[in-house]
Amino acid sequence: MTTTLTGDALATTRPEPFWLDSPDRPQPRPRLEGDVHCDLAVVGGGYCGLWTALRAKERHPERDVVLVEADRIGGAASGRNGGFCEASLTHGEANGRARWPAEADRLEELGLANLDEIEATLRRYGIDCDFRRTGVLNVATRPHEVDELRAGADGDRTVFLDSAAVRAEVASPTYLAGLWSKDTCATVDPARLAWGLAAAAERLGVRIVEGTSAERIRRSGGRIAVHTAHGTVHARQVALGTNAYRPLLRRLRLATVPVYDYALMTEPLTDEQLASIGWTHRQGLADCGNQFHYYRLTADNRILWGGYDAVYHYGRQVRASYDQRQKTFDLLARQFLATFPQLAGIRFSHQWGGAIDTCTRFCAFFGTAYGGRVAYALGFTGLGVGATRFGADVMLDLLAGEDSERTRLAMVRQRPLPFPPEPVAWLGIQLTRWSLARANARAGRRNPWLRLLDRLGLGFDS
Ligand SMILES: Cc1cc2nc3c(=O)[nH]c(=O)nc-3n(C[C@H](O)[C@H](O)[C@H](O)COP(=O)(O)OP(=O)(O)OC[C@H]3O[C@@H](n4cnc5c(N)ncnc54)[C@H](O)[C@@H]3O)c2cc1C
């Protein structure tokens, strides 16, 4: 059944992120050799670090900024994600409303403003990353999800679509209803966004080194020294955008866990194949449920299909070998063809995975160390394409000691509960995954473990 359904759809698939497999990928920049001095050192060349470097120069052009990337710019999550650039700063409105009801409306406004500013920045610097503000269409594929979607409609910018209407937008026999949020999401080519931000930052004078891992940070005289294998950055201040990787601050070691998310990319659809689906508004799509798929079209009419499985490896490890997981790719291919049976026979060109920095509140948290000279933002939990820009501004506010609207937010001041050490973390995460899969299969009914997590504010419900 399995083999018949997917045929040889995965027979010639390349084991690498589609977005990074491009002739336009910039050559690596040289590594750091020797000692340099600067006002601000940024560690991490994903969106979080890149936005921090760019915003630092925009806010204070005279500031001397050095960005240190262990591997390649955009080589980690920022160059391999689904490219859903969402307004939400809180991993969805429901999560924000449950945790910070008093400021939830303002967080939504700040998120929309952040997305507007991303759009304006791309225009300002001429960053061509196929940014399309087509919104996101959430689809119900199980009866109990229909009313949840209906309740989310506001009749204007967020529109409920019944079964016929949603299938008229995008033709899948599995759709029972849809909720199209028209301006809260854009799709981007994620790698081009990272490369474009790096180039823009350099044009403003930021110095970027690649292949340079920050091994430790220490106080050194009046400065903070960022030590690397071949040199040291002596900075007045440091911003850490290291995402799911081993944090440089000991206090953050239990704050996040790397959870692996996987995606497939099809070959470009023919005009007939695309016509068989419709999808003329090119929205980002996601189904409901705790284990959900996200999917979208690319500029050359491929479909990226990702999500569902979230895999945690014992010991909080981030390893290149985890980027490939055939079991998950087979499952994703089967689920894809069940959603779009009219595409039977299609092949997937690329398969890959990447680590998501999951924290117990499912959205970014912030803080400082070394007497306010070092700031960090992490824990974006799978929704960081847009929110990292906001995180960058929070870090810069914190480093400036500014009493801003951002730094007054409870969302910024509060920190999430840490995960327990191993083996409890691994056991707890496996039990949660198993329980979420059961809830998905049982009309969303949550078992006692999930209800306990919900009571503690630790329950994940997309
Ligand atoms: C498969 C997948 C799909 C996703 N889909 C979406 C999506 O559609 N929408 C969305 O909003 N989010 C999505 N995400 C999440 C999103 O990609 C991340 O939230 C975002 O990219 C985080 O950016 P970042 O800069 O914090 O992290 P990263 O991009 O991981 O960058 C961190 C960088 O820091 C570097 N680094 C770490 N430690 C050091 C050190 N000691 N010294 C020097 N450099 C260091 C790393 O090499 C890395 O390049 C997805 C993630 C994955 C993996």
Image (cartoon, rainbow, N blue to C red):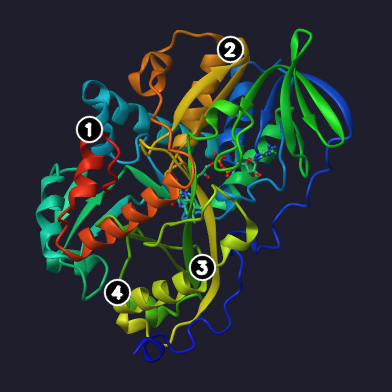
Q: CA distance from mark 2 to mark 1?
A: 30 Å
Q: List the residue tagged with mark 4.
A: 339
Residue depicted at x 35% and y 79%: 337
Ligand 1 visible in quadrant:
top right
Please rate how many residues cluster around mark 2, counting C-alpha atoms within 10 Å: few if below 14, some from 14 to 19, many from 20: some
Asked whether residue 14 is in view, the answer is yes
Q: CA distance from mark 3 to mark 2?
A: 46 Å
Residue depicted at x 58% and y 25%: 55
Residue type, numbered disc 1: Ala
Quarter where residue 459 is shown? top left
Residue 98, numbered circle: 1
Compare marks 4 and 2 and give the one earlier in the sequence. Answer: 4
Residue 10, numbered circle: none
Mark 4 vs mark 1, foreground winner is: 1
Queried on whether the Cβ of the residue with tag 1 lies below 8 angstroms from ligand 1, the answer reads no
Residue type, numbered disc 2: Gly
User: Do residues under tags 4 and 3 come within 8 Å of each other at their CB atoms?
Assistant: no
Queried on whether the Cβ of the residue with tag 3 lies below 8 angstroms from ligand 1, the answer reads no
Q: List the residue tagged with mark 3.
A: 300
Residue type, numbered disc 4: Thr
Q: Is residue 282 left or right of residue 221?
A: left
Q: CA distance from mark 4 to mark 2?
A: 50 Å
Q: CA distance from mark 4 to mark 3?
A: 21 Å
Horizontal and vertical percent for residue 324?
56, 67
For residue 391, above or below residue 236:
below
Residue depicted at x 34% and y 56%: 433
Q: CA distance from mark 1 to mark 3?
A: 39 Å
Please rate how many residues cluster around mark 3, counting C-alpha atoms within 10 Å: few if below 14, some from 14 to 19, many from 20: few
Please rate how many residues cluster around mark 1, counting C-alpha atoms within 10 Å: few if below 14, some from 14 to 19, many from 20: few
For residue 442, above or below residue 111:
below
